[in-house]
Image (tube, rainbow, N blue to C red):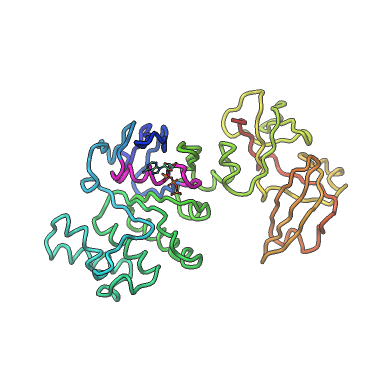
Amino acid sequence: MIFDLELNSIGKVYDNGTPAVTDFNLSVTKGEFIAFLGPSGCGKTTTLRMIAGFETISSGDMLIRGERMNDVPPQRRPTSMIFQNYALFPHMSVRRNVGYGLEVKGLSKADREAKVDRILATLGLEDIAERKPEKLSGGQRQRIALARGLVVEPDILLLDEPLGALDANLRKAIQNELKLLQKSLGVTFIFVTHAQSEALALSDRIVVMNQGRVEQISPPHQLYTRPNTPFVAQFIGRNTVLSGEVAGNDGEDVMVATGIGMLSGRANGTLASHGRVNLVVPAEAIEVNAAGRGMLTGARNRVDARIERSEVVGHIAHLTARLQDGRVVSLEAHVDKYRPGAFPAGSHVFLSWNPAEATVIPAH
Ligand SMILES: Nc1ncnc2c1ncn2[C@@H]1O[C@H](COP(=O)(O)OP(=O)(O)OP(=O)(O)O)[C@@H](O)[C@H]1O
């Protein structure tokens, strides 16, 4: 099988000795939407720029459609890059901005116009084709940048925080457009973001990076429900992470001895039969019960807690509870489940969860 993109143990050390990316492995199939997600400085942009050819690769191999690209200059790679600030030419019309890459490639005027017209129509930009970008809105400028990236018909479109300059509402609207456009064109997108909601909404798979290393590569739902590492558990979603020791198995469940009792979850992959682990419990998986009731039903994973704060925002009830060891846990659920006022601050409750919804991962 030929992948659109293969990163084989890619590494980057800057001239000043900064190791920005270490041992990055990824294979991308045609038409996939991949997000690089991680905190500031984790190496997302450096990796994107290595794929584009704007940054040299210090170690490892990069292949596009089976061809090694390490030494191929950016303009000869089948990639286009869209920058956060769009980098449009302010004095050129939208049409010329979009057609610029084709001019550089030396296409005839007729071919250029045909391709530009087609992409302007695809992105709904025909009416502003003769305007200058500086007079246009952020959303329009974003679309022009997309048109300019796509008009050269790249195998891979690289997008560096392309929605970062837009306000929240516009961001949401353009997110949807972007996803539809990507699926209809079937072009591979590699998208850099530090906004997890954006990555979760758009991607087929997300690469979570931390300090230059890949922590996990998974589809959004799996990343959210089955984190592989303590970093991902803290970074994605709203999880409570409880440390403990493996104390045995009960069917598919792994029992974990923690400072607040014997608790359980499901292993993510293979797990040693003993040793230190983390039990990751998503906020959505935690049930709040009035004190005393669970004793009757014999609920597993029973943790005593006291409600500290209870707040309803729209349809979502947010509760904050303090465990016996002092740890604070965040919980949330639709108001159908926790009516406003059901668990006032100070009330004594116990928390429980279905072990299948909690994940046990190695501590390191
Ligand atoms: N030109 C450079 N020279 C030296 N070090 C650099 C250079 N560019 C980036 N770095 C360093 O490499 C590391 C990775 O930076 P990079 O910009 O790839 O991170 P990022 O995840 O894209 O961050 P952000 O979300 O803030 O853009 C950081 O430690 C950064 O300081």
Q: Is residue 68 above or below residue 314?
A: above
Q: Is residue 40 magenta?
A: yes
Choose top left, top right, bottom left or bottom right for residue 19: top left
Residue 192 x, y percent position in the rendering? 42, 50
Rendered position, 161 above or below 1: below
The count of marks equals 0
Q: Which one is in front, 166 or 257?
A: 166
Looking at the rendering, which quadrant does residue 232 occupy? top right
- The quarter of the rendered structure image containing the N terminus is top left
Q: In the figure, is residue 51 to the left or right of 167?
A: left
Dividing the picture into quadrants, the one containing residue 63 is top left
Rendered location of residue 357, percent (x, y): 65, 43
Instruction: Using residue 115 as the reference point, say whether residue 20 is left or right of it.
Output: right
Residue 29 part of the magenta segment = no
For the residue pair 127 and 54, the one nearer the viewer reads as 54
Q: Is residue 248 left or right of residue 22?
A: right
Please report the residue visible at 32 percent of the width from the left and 40 percent of the height from the top.
3
In the image, 210 versus 318, the foreground residue is 210
Q: Which residue is painted at 59% across and 34% down in the image?
A: 268
Q: Position of residue 200 (x, y in %)?
A: 51, 52
Q: Nearer the viewer, residue 238 or 180?
A: 238
Q: Magenta span covers which residues?
A: 37-55
Q: Residue at x 73, y 47 (%)?
A: 328
Q: Quadrant of ligand 1?
A: top left
**In the rendered image of this protein, does residue 137 appear above or below residue 219?**
below
Query: Which quarter of the rendering shows the C terminus?
Result: top right
Residue 283 in the image, given as x and y percentages of width and height: 67, 49
